[in-house]
Image (cartoon, rainbow, N blue to C red):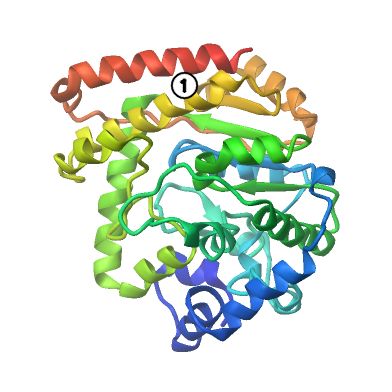
Amino acid sequence: MIFSSFKEIAIKNYSYLSQILHQQFLEKGEILNFAIRRIKKKSLNININLSRHIFITGLARSGTTALLQSLDSTNDFGSLRYKYMPFILIPKISNIFSKYLINKEDNKIERIHGDGIKINTNSPECLDEPYWLNTTYKKYNFSKIITPHNIEKKDLEGYIYLLNEYIKIENKEHLIIKNNNAHLRILDLSSLLPNSQFLVLFRSPISHAISLLRLHKRLIKIQEENEFVLRYMEMIGHWEFGKGKKPFIYENNQEINLTRINDTDLKYWLKQWIFSYEWILKKVCSRKRSNIKLVCYEDLCNNKNYLDSFYESIAVNPEKINFNFKNKKTDILGEVSLQTKDLNYANEIYRMLRNESYK
């Protein structure tokens, strides 16, 4: 199982060969540079208007993976899967090696998050971010923070070429792509890809903030025990939590506000929730684009009419879904009273987001 990243990250153990392959194909070196150059060359004058995909985004821990697995269970869509790592940027190679992996359903292992979601080599995951890291991100200084950013047409053409290659490999007409960072470029993506759909997940602010904090602490401990887990997360652009965490910043004063709070404090994560979803509400929802849809995680879990209506709105037959959404009750540990003002504001944003999600 040299090339099976899903198992290695689940048990937090990487062979020496696996580490070298990840570094060469995802982190640095001529192989990575060659992969990006090849994508750019192959994508010249590609027709991006033909693209019809479903993009899932939102802050981490908002239910994006659950929704991804739900849609994947229909077998109507292709996706980027663990079995294509670490060769994700060279589709032909990833396709060759993926055929040597065992994809039995009973081989599923709980993912590193410790949240009960199980994965195997055939599970879909957020694996397109390495492309953006080596193209668009190079034009910005994202050393400490990550901000909303614009996409140049040539970078988008390369991205669509990459997705088209996986459409062929997956033998499907459309892909579902989950990427929590995609909300930072959703304005450009939704404008340049009008035939694609963009689903923005949100979740009750206090339970969401607590979930983020718990995973942040969990990953810090794991990364202290195994340094390569940190490097792996940086290679694939997962900066939401852990030792390599970089905050999402949407306005200049927000970075100052966050640096005043310890990131092991619940207040920090509630602030991050507010900054992110306030921006989505004001800058994204205000555009009234028909291909952007807000999706409330609690309603997916608790409201069957909402769930069925949602599936129908994206042309998915609810009867084909083989997945149950679970809304675990969160123990707030008496911490809510510490941020009453922020929590009230967050709940108001949540209320407005829910109203938008029913439109």
Q: Say whether residue 223 is visible.
A: yes
Mark 1 highlights which residue? 282
Q: Quadrant of residue 271?
A: top left
Q: Which amino acid is tagged 1?
A: Lys
Extreme-bottom residue of the structure? 17
Q: Say whether residue 1 is visible.
A: no
- The secondary element bearing badge 1 is classed as helix
Looking at the image, residue 5 lies above or below residue 131: below
Who's the residue at 46% across and 48% down the image? 116
Q: Nearer the viewer, residue 83 or 342?
A: 342
Looking at the image, residue 133 lies above or below residue 4: above
Looking at the image, residue 9 lies above or below residue 356: below
Q: Quadrant of residue 302?
A: top right
Who's the residue at 56% across and 15% down the image? 356
Residue 340: x, y in percent?
19, 17
Who's the residue at 50% across and 45% down the image? 149
Residue 190: x, y in percent?
66, 36
Residue 59: x, y in percent?
44, 39
What is the quadrant of the N terminus in the image?
Answer: bottom right
Looking at the image, residue 18 lies above or below residue 177: below
Q: Is residue 313 left or right of residue 66?
A: right
Q: Nearer the viewer, residue 11 or 128?
A: 128
Q: Residues within 10 Å of mark 1 (few under 14, many from 20)?
A: few
Q: Is residue 295 left or right of residue 327?
A: right
Who's the residue at 77% across and 63% down the image? 43
